[in-house]
Image: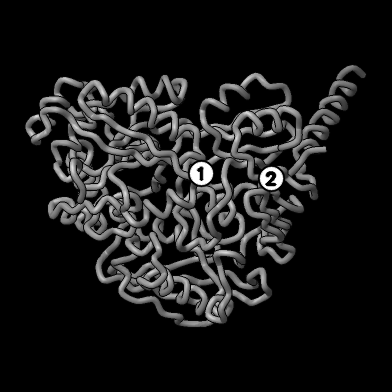
Amino acid sequence: MQRRLGLALWVMLALGLALAQTPVRGGTLQIAVDSSPAGLDPQVATAFATFLITGEIYEGLVEVNERLAVQPSLAESWKISDDGLKYIFKLRPGVTFQNGQPLTSADVVYSFDRVRDPKTGSPLASRFTLVKEVKATGPAEVTFELSQPFAPFLSELSNLVIVPSEYVKGGGDLQRKAVGTGPFQLKEWVPDTYILLERNPHYWRESRPYLDALKFNIVPDAATRQVGLASGTYQFLPNIDPTLAVALKETPGVKLYQSQDLSYSLIGMNASRKPFDNPKVREALNYAIDRKALVQAVYFGNGTPAGPLSPSLKSWSPPTSAWSCYNYNPAKAKELLAQAGYPNGVDFTILTLGSVKTVVDAAQVVQAQIAQAGFRAKIEVLELGKFVQEWRNSNFEAFASLNGGSSDPDGYFYRTFSTGGSTNVFKYSNPQVDQLLNQGRTTTNLEARRKIYARLQVILACQGPIAHLVYGTLFSAARDNVQGFRPTPTRSLASLRDTWLAK
């Protein structure tokens, strides 16, 4: 009898746990974010504030999951030719855009051509320089032909979202009216107040999303976001800074998610302007920064000193001890400044993205650190729109910001450091770097690629146009009734399609 009773209790417990894990449909997830996007065009955006929104509206042929592996999305399958020069994608049947138009191969071709068109000004353009041609080889088949083997092609393709060709060619403004194939669609945008996304009722993933809506509340003040989450006004804070994460750690009813960030904080230098046109000055700045102290002062220990690649890419990223300039040495920095013709130090301005507390804090700590080596920096705090404008136009001596990484080194290095690269706002040009970058993307042998990127990092770490600061631990915070969310090093919120609110 006792055995039967115990078995019954076990079955009841198991059933209760199963029910507790069963997704519940409905509800609006109240999200608080620190800034409003400057626009919603996913093919010209550079700011995380935009990607948080467009990532729920648009999709690509493939996507990168939380393990940084490429998996199918709008393409249900693909084949690669024996010579590695042709990728043939079969589109998923029954997919429609949120305006009711069916997804076709013509939309894929148009989306690619739009990114490659110089008039678009897309930061994605440099990712696809080895694509020779894209053809619609059937209503639901697209063939990409490469000019050379391109090892990271699939991971790069995850960045190309598909837009509706007829809508855009008909005069549709993607900056104001987003139209994609994703789980949520744009319902309302009140600038600097909130963006409301509603469930896409025709989404191709069966039963997804579970939520009726996502409301992105624009809340610049971190303390207000903290109080709002603690009180239940907000239910989710994505990609928060370590200061806020520490404050929320012991808050009742709140749980923290974390992963290693692919993104990093940085000081970017304009290599076409004095004093940073001299590589010795750039090297001196690296010696003048105490990255370990930055990890403690700004990230409360939740981070690691940044080299050119994230520690998430374990097989590509050596420890920062591999580069001498990452050893804090103000005396060496002074010596290099003197060799560069600046024995009395230098004066310059750091433009700073004011909407991200980590960036402002890091800039202030760096300002104090580098002063000991003769760098007299003035900090100018800008709002997002102005910062992006100055960044795009290379109108800076230096800037402090966050920069996104990639699941493959080429996705970050080529666009950033190649001569004329689509995000090379630093005006940096180095023939040796260009040669290695081209070798890195066209070499298919994995070990040979690792050696190429190891050589690149030696050059870029000390004399490149970026002083990499810290890769932080990536935190998100949610009320404990938020279920199904999975963090990812890319900062993607794609798993919101699988998220639900427990009753």
Image quarter hosting the N terminus: top right
Q: Is residue 50 above or below residue 487?
A: below
Q: Residue at x 20, y 42 (%)?
A: 276
Q: Nearer the viewer, residue 494 or 40?
A: 40
Answer yes or no: is residue 451 visible: no
Q: Quadrant of residue 379?
A: top left
Q: Quadrant of residue 501?
A: top right
Q: Is residue 277 above or below residue 141?
A: above
Image quarter hosting the C terminus: top right
- Kind of residue indicated by mark 1: Arg
Residue 327 % position (x, y) = 22, 23
The CA distance from mark 2 to mark 1 is: 16 Å
Answer yes or no: is residue 446 visible: yes
- Kind of residue indicated by mark 2: Thr
Mark 1 Cα shell of 10 Å, populated few (<14), some (14-19), many (≥20): many
| Residue 499 tag number | 2
Q: Nearer the viewer, residue 277 or 345?
A: 345
Q: What secondary structure is marked by label 2?
A: loop
Mark 2 Cα shell of 10 Å, populated few (<14), some (14-19), many (≥20): many
Q: Nearer the viewer, residue 460 or 467?
A: 467
Q: Residue at x 42, y 20 (%)?
A: 297
Residue 196 % position (x, y) = 70, 54
Tally of marks: 2
Q: What secondary structure is marked by label 1?
A: loop
Residue 409 % position (x, y) = 32, 48
Q: Nearer the viewer, residue 275 or 236?
A: 275
Q: Give left or right: position of 471 versus 480.
A: left
| Residue 491 tag number | 1
Q: Earlier in the sequence, mark 2 or mark 1?
A: 1
